[in-house]
Image: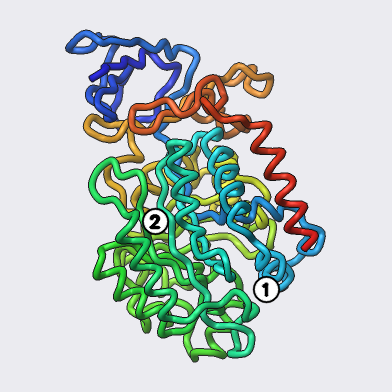
Amino acid sequence: MTRLWIKQPLDLLCDEDGVTGLVVEGGCISELLTHDKPPAQPCDVTFDAREHVVVPGLVNCHHHFYQTLTRALPAALNQELFSWLKNLYPVWAGLTPSMISLSSELALAELMLSGCTLAADHHYLFPQGLESAIDLQVAAAQKLGIRVVLTRGSMSLGEKDGGLPPQTVVQTEQTILDDSERLIRTHHQTGDGAMVQMALAPCSPFSVTTEIMRASADLAAQYQVGLHTHLAETLDEEAFCLQQFGLRTVDYLDSVNWLRPGTWLAHGIHFNDEEIARLGAAKVGVCHCPCSNMVLASGICRACELEAAGCPVGLGVDGSASNDGSNMVGEVRQAMMLQRLRYGAAAVSHLDAWRWATQGGAAVLGRSDTGRIAAGLQADLALFKMDELRFSGSHEPLAALLLCGAQKADRVMVGGEWTVIDGEIPGLDRHKLMADHWQAARTLADR
């Protein structure tokens, strides 16, 4: 096996003090080097990292890849969640398999170039002809070499039954469960180093029945996969739960057997103190999506209190139609800024934001093999340079990457393999991908 020495980085995000390099072997970090000591055994390759800040690969806990096709769509501008969705559902109903492939590849490429090594996607739209959507996402991820947790989303509560989505995009419970089981059996990998994992993800309280929530929880327990949904994103959602079920959002979650480890929630904004304590006791993960929450004016997640209560807390870029970007390092900066707005500048450091984006995100997705730079863990790394005008005059590198607004990684490694080199993805024709994606976006909008 090739041994790679990443030597003398400009700075490095690591729990251990005095680390001045690391050795990668067999897809894992085999050795941390301290105080300029050389590796214990000779290395085949040395990478001079004197110009690089090295951090664990960033973890994106919530996304909707297909939404890259509807960024800044006029029909959905300047709206809050419910009206935004109502205007976009009919557009998304026109998605085709080729659009799913293009949007997934583009979203993943955008994430990778911003330092992401593990991404979760929540795909819940399965109009007729799009039954293979998640299989196509698997293919896109394998082509690019990024780790993914792909969640089999679902919508079963259409407009005629009091839900939000149109009937054209809802499915029957049996169809949802059969396909969920198929995807788990076909694609889900277990153990350290898994590249593709599955989870089950009924979309939201306002788009699925209680029956599919309970059945998904049972199926997830049977196969030991994660559970994911949107929850407590807006006050409108809270009002819907009270009207439809007579319950607040966390009580509803409890009623359908979701208050347990392995569950993670997107947004998690409108929880009271008692609900935060219950979520923490149950070890339910929360994905903070700062840019999306600001674009739709949904509110600010109580990330510090959730984490203190025992919830794993990670970050997500959310859909590229509510965020309009898939830049993970940009999301880390935004999380730091927004949480400071809630708690104060002294209460949220740049290291807090980095923690949410790395080991916190890994914990949210149930991964103990990545998210940190430590011996024995997967060699999932993001390397950033500070050779742009924006960084001139900066002093503390890890703080400067966020405060000065880093936008792209120079190098990214997944499982010991370079997936980004000199700011480009090897083998990817980025210009052709963009041209094809642009055409698909226009076609979708014109349907």
10 Å neighbourhood of mark 2: few (<14), some, or many (≥20)?
many
**Pointers 1 and 2 in contact (C-beta within 8 Å):** no
Q: Is residue 280 above or below residue 116?
A: below
Query: Label 2 is placed on what type of residue?
Result: Glu
Picture quadrant of residue 19 = top left
Q: Estimate the x, y position of residue 290 in percent, counting from the top left.
A: 59, 53
**Residue at x 77% of width, y 52% of height:** 442
Q: Is residue 124 above or below residue 157?
A: above
Q: Nearer the viewer, mark 1 or mark 2?
A: 1
| Residue under numbered circle 1 | 82
Colour mode?
rainbow
Query: Label 1 is placed on what type of residue?
Result: Phe
Picture quadrant of residue 406 = top right
**Residue at x 23% of width, y 12% of height:** 39
**Residue at x 61% of width, y 49% of height:** 103
| Residue under numbered circle 2 | 307
The quadrant in which the N terminus is found is top left
Which residue occupies the foreground of this view, 445 or 85? 445
Per the image, label 2 sits on a secondary structure element best described as: helix
Position of 166 compared to 109: left or right?
right
Q: How many marks?
A: 2
Say whether residue 333 is visible: no
The quadrant in which the C terminus is found is bottom right
Which residue occupies the foreground of this view, 40 or 76? 76
Q: Estimate the x, y position of residue 186 in percent, counting from the top left.
A: 33, 57
